[in-house]
Amino acid sequence: MTLSEGPAAVPLLSVRGLTKLFGSFAACNAIDLDIGSGEIHALLGENGAGKSTLVKMLFGVLQPSAGQILWQGAPVTIASPGEARHLGIGMVFQHFSLFEALTVAENIALSLDPKISLARISDEAASLSKAYGLPLDPQAHVADLSVGERQRIEIVRALLQNPKLIILDEPTSVLTPQEADRLFETLFKLKAEGRSVLYISHRLEEVRRICDRATVLRHGKVTGACDPKQETPASLARMMVGSDVAEVHRDNAAALGDICVEVSNLSVPARTPFAVSLKKITMKVRAGEVLAIAGVAGNGQGELFDALSGEYPVAEDEAIRIRGKAVGRTGINGRRLLGAGFVPEERHGHAAVSAMALSDNLLLARSQSDKKAFLSGGAFSVIRFDAIRSATRRICEAMDVRKSGEDPQAGSLSGGNLQKFIVGRELDRQPSVLVVNQPTWGVDAGAASRIRQALIDLAKSGSAVVVISQDLDEIFEVATNIAVISEGCLSEPHPAGTLTLERIGLLMGGVHESHSVPEAANAH
Amino acid sequence: MRIELQKRARVSTLFSVLSPLLALALTLAFGAIMFWLLGKNPVSALYSFFVEPLLEVWSLHELAIKAAPLILIAVGLSVCYRSNNWNIGAEGQFTIGAITGSILPVMYPAWHSPIILPLMLILGMLGGALYAGIPALLKTRFNTNEILTSLMLVYIAQLYLDWLVRGPWRDPQGNNFPITKTFQIEAVVPEILSSSGRAHWAFIFAIVAAVALWFMMRFMLKGFEVSVLGQSERAGRFAGFSARRMVWFSMLLSGALAGLAGISEVSGSIGHVQPVISPGYGFTAIIVAFLGRLNPLGIIASGLVLALTYLGGEAAQLSIGISDKVSRVFQGLLLFFVLSCDTLIHYRVRLIFAGTKTAEVRG
């Protein structure tokens, strides 16, 4: 908190006019940045602002098109990650590069000099992890570890190189609040040793909490440099987005109707060795309710979505009821015909085919539910392109989907715009049940608030909405009731108002509650 | 200096059109070099290979005869490949189709009836489809790689045919030649214009199949299902399409068309069954399918081009005295260049010189 004045005389790392062109598109445009010794420096920006491109250049994964990188005052060319490590730059990627079938020590050994023995690596990793408060068993298999523990491997792997600068890319996106706190303590220790941290995030609260300085990127350009502690989340958001973000509005007094989704004692064995099995999941969602399911990634969210959507029907027909009908063994289109809509987590290759036009992607989800409107010719099922195109236009207007051209490929849209289309595609049908997995994952703030508002409005109009999300802010914004999924078990639902962040954190961490929850908690 | 492929932001329309033409031009250029190395005049060799066969009416008929099986098989394969099922065994399905279709004329040579030919064609399609059903069954039940199984089944089919015509199906009056009796006239696919040449109805079947499948792929939900499952099985599952059923559909369809090609070839072009009934149509059709951009209408054009390499090979053997294996060389060159030119549709090629200098070679 005393280091907010700025860098020392010679910054550890300076970047001058750094530019990266992909074709004619400038992912990074003349970026200037200084990171002093012993500071935690935040790099803020929405998805697509150029954060990842910038750090990839700093770590030698990408080569800049123009500009200069200065390391302790001297210009350097970082041609590969190996050279970056040699200089003293370590990096923890957002997506871990770990082999699940190998042990922690073996995974660490893969990134080090092959001459060092495995035993020595184990020892060093163990002592290092203890010193920094990152408990880790070197002999454990990665497949058995939680996401937080896997991240620790990556951090320890970076620390073993004794770096002067550690780059962390969205490290808390996969952590519970408690795990995040522990990570922050580690970061403060690193800082106290005089090491620098470049911390990439779009979570404004934590940036304000731990970072000494912040550089804000938008559309590949630096739009602001500030001391985050002097700013409010709103002022930081303005710098990131370039305009004020609409707030999500919700009326609290929504009357709940009939039960639309009922899951009772649903157990699903894991399909693959690394998948999660669902254990006795029970839940009820009424018309007018938004049930949010919180949880750390990889605790059965995807498996629950597969079972609810009918992409992988379950053995027990009675385990899932949609609007009173037993549908456990019914496929996804049968459930759609009952009025259900689904939005999976992964946009590319699941919710949409990237190389196909938007109108084709509309047909993808609605070929059976809107058979009358979209198909003709009886058994030949001839596609009515005109009807589909006009529906596509309607959806794009309703959700304000920004696109180039009349009917572009889904892959050419930004994440936020494609997600608006995918959600709008379901809303356009006025579904009486909507199941959404990670509705705003990797989506810019403007699109996210629009999607959340749409989910609330849908519930208000009398539909049952299930939102599976890792984003606690989002959950508190939209939920009527909140349940937590952990290792394939679902907690009792709690009214959103009665849960604190801390309590959710405990549930997310797998502290299962006893079944003596007061009746009032799940009466809604 | 190194060569780098850089992914384009979007598919290049220019190169989508240009790539097959570029591949053809490169094939011709390297063909000319080959002729030159063989000590022939490249210009006159290429002329007799690619132009001469087009100058006579009877020769155009031969072109249609050669193109028919190529197009029939390739349009079926295009559906397979678009759905991400890699049937490499069309040659085997062609052979089995020829065998099952020939059961009637070989076993009942005295049966004279107008329904014999339709029955033969249906039996041929059934045989080809069932034979393609073997890799489909193995893939859906045991997750076996259909590239390997369908290819291996080719050799089984060819040896089975060989055994049949040397054994049980051999014509007793055939002077010990390994051929069956000549089919009765009712069992022969009729010629289209018998006054000018030999081309028979297989060519019509091919055009009809190509147009029908083009319509399916372009306008029908089934075609949409094929493309979706081919590009992303997960998205197909989200749409409620079944990848497993698509394996069956595409394999049975391409098998049936290959079987139809087989029986049409035996009945229309050869007139009896013999140990070798195909100059590799089933394999060449793979080139045809890709050269035609997996588009059934494009396949009509590319089928004619590849048929020309067969005719050219025969012509070159006669007029300039080189082996007709030259046509296989041309087919190989063509497939190689088609696939490599397709890279340009998705990537741009850059030459990276040491240091920071970057030269762009192709836009």
Image (cartoon, helix red, strand yellow):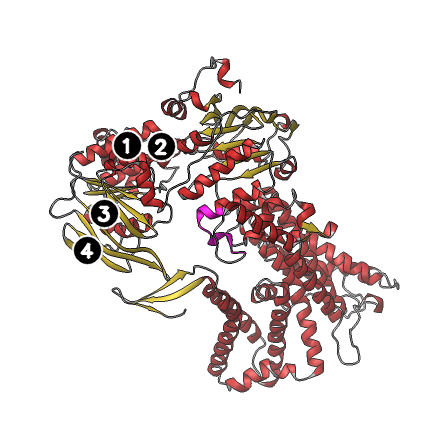
**Location of residue B118 by image quarter:** bottom right
**Mark on residue B182?**
none
**Residue position marked by numbered label 3 in the rendering:** A85
**Mark on residue A76?**
4
Are the residues flagged by discs 4 and 2 from a single subunit?
yes
Looking at the rendered structure, the kind of residue marked 3 is: Arg
Contact check, label 4 and label 2, Cβ < 8 Å: no
The first of marks 4 and 3 along the sequence is 4
Which range of residues does the magenta coloring cover? A407-418
Disc 2 chain ID: A
Looking at the rendered structure, the kind of residue marked 2 is: Leu
Q: Is residue B14 above or below residue A103?
A: below
Few, some or many C-alpha atoms within 10 Å of disc 2 (few <14, some 14-19, many ≥20)? many
Q: Nearer the viewer, mark 4 or mark 3?
A: 4
**Distance Cα–Cα, label 4 vs label 2:** 35 Å
* Mark 2, secondary structure of its residue: loop
**Is B143 inside the magenta-drawn segment?**
no
**Residue position marked by numbered label 2 in the rendering:** A175
Contact check, label 1 and label 3, Cβ < 8 Å: no
The first of marks 4 and 1 along the sequence is 4
Are the residues flagged by discs 4 and 3 from a single subunit?
yes
The first of marks 1 and 2 along the sequence is 2
